[in-house]
Amino acid sequence: MQGAWLSLEQCGHLLRDAVLLFQQGRYASAVGLAMVARDELGKYKALLELWNRVRAGEPVTTADVPRNHLERQKLAVMSATLMDGDDPERQRKFDALSAARSDDERQRAIADLADAEVRRADRERAFYVDPTDAGWSRPVANFSRERAERVIVDALNDYRVQHDPENRRLIYSGRRPGLHEALEAWTEKPPLPAPPEPQGAGLI
């Protein structure tokens, strides 16, 4: 429980730093930090599941905490967005989400929209110079302002849901009975960083 909360806290710090970099025009670095924040969000979800297992009497160890970046990105999938200018394939995927009738169908549709493998690749493209068939991948040239903004806003949206106390209470009570009360009893837990507010005409 403590590790999950601290991972969510770190996610918030990284997203706030990503917004600062975005506002300075450092789009690649901002995207990279947003993807690392998503890693922490995925770890948060994994640790909550481990809490469930421990509460059920199952032993767990630190080896059960996922360290694979792709696995964490998959776990961090919580929502998806559709924006003007999105290609027909993304529209098709979004239609599949709208048509989902069960939780399993909805989760599969969101995972399809979220593109965890693309997000993991973005993390690499944001930080590292690498050879490609066409020459070199340069982080500074890989992300437009619009692309970076969308990546960060999507991550912020997912963090906001977990940051909101009432949302957490509702989510926990349905899937992890007792967790909300256990967190409330942990009086020394650090406060979660507040999500940045939209500024001016832009989203962040």
Image (cartoon, rainbow, N blue to C red):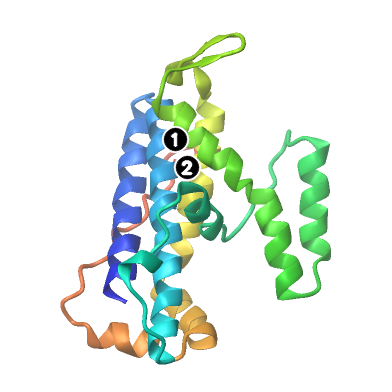
Residue 145 x/y as whole percent:
50, 26
State the residue at coordinates (70%, 46%). 82
> Could you classify mark 2 by the number of other residues whose Cα lies within 10 Å: few (under 14), some (14-19), or many (20 or more)?
many
Q: Which residue is mark 1?
A: 31
Q: Quadrant of the N terminus?
A: bottom left
State the residue at coordinates (50%, 45%). 153
Q: Is residue 54 above or below residue 47?
A: below
Labelled pair 2, 1 in contact (Cβ < 8 Å): yes
Quadrant of the image occupied by residue 98? bottom right
Residue 87 x/y as whole percent:
78, 35
Q: Which residue is mark 2?
A: 152
Earlier in the chain: of badge 2 and badge 1, it is: 1
Residue 203 x/y as whole percent:
50, 42
| 96 left or right of 180 in image | right
| 147 left or right of 129 in image | right
| 44 left or right of 107 in image | left
